[in-house]
Amino acid sequence: MSIEAMHDLRGRMAVVIGGARDLGYDMAEILAAAGCDLALTSRDLERAEAAAERLRSDYGRQVESAALDICDPDQVAACAERMPAADVLVNNAGGGLDLHPTHFFDRAPAHIAQLIDTNLTGMLYCCQAFGRSMAARGSGSIINIASIAGLCGRDRRMYDQTGLPEQPVEYAAAKAGVIGATRDLAGLLSPLGVRVNAISPGGFERGQPQAFIDAYSRATPMGRMGRDGVDLKGAALFLASDASAYVTGQNLTVDGGFAIWK
């Protein structure tokens, strides 16, 4: 198989959950560049449609948009019913949600539950709804976006000394759950023709205080934070395409080496 054929996604359709901005948009963009038609979801329909229109204009692909709260299983099921032919599912919704305070001893129980629902439970709802139709067809690729937070404990001094609110502990718990669920889902779905893998990004530079960027970069073997528009695209294309046809149950860490340099 040629290099081009390995990465050719023409004739396929990908659903990118949380695909309207940042890393979600980056992954949608590289899939569109490889010839894939798309459906983007966001909690904000206007943001999803703006991103979809940009991809239609830039790549000439068919791109749908939809509002979706992944914490609502009925919404997820309805979304999957409207898009039964998805060949690729990228579960990218999540994040820290800007719920304050962030220190573990000060976290509100409702905030803990909300963050876990958004980063783990919603991912399971999406895998269930879209994975069912993939399994019925006997093919598909599911890519769950985890985090290096699920792989290593954080040095909180990096936050305390630079004025950045720290990453909540339950975020690490949820992302570790994504990695574990990915492995077990791969065991369930791979015999049915559906590959399931995860990507664990490290920190990406996105307007943090310069002191934090410098501290994070010093703690990373490659000497920098990740770059939007660049550093996650190759991993997503690899796992979505036939270049990874014999890869399942894996967690691809994209972090400049942060998680190994301890």
Image (cartoon, rainbow, N blue to C red):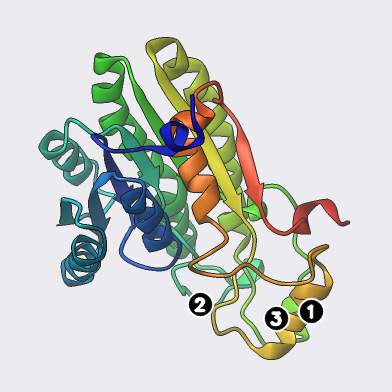
Q: Is residue 174 visible?
A: no
Q: Position of residue 2 (x, y in %)?
A: 49, 30
Q: Are marks 1 and 3 in contact (CB under 8 Å)?
A: yes
- The quarter holding residue 11 reads top left
For residue 139, side relative to residue 7 (left or right): left
Residue placed at 42% from the left, 54% from the top? Answer: 27
> Dot 1: what SS?
helix
- The quarter holding residue 170 reads bottom right
Instruction: Give the residue type that dot 3 points to.
Output: Ile
In this view, 29 is above or below 37: below
Task: Looking at the image, tell me whether mark 3 or mark 2 is earlier in sequence order.
Answer: 2
Q: Which mark is residue 213?
A: 3
| Residue linked to disc 2 | 100
Q: Residue furthest top?
A: 191
| Residue linked to disc 1 | 215
User: Which residue is nearer to you in this view: 121 or 238?
Assistant: 238
Q: Position of residue 244 (x, y in %)?
A: 52, 30
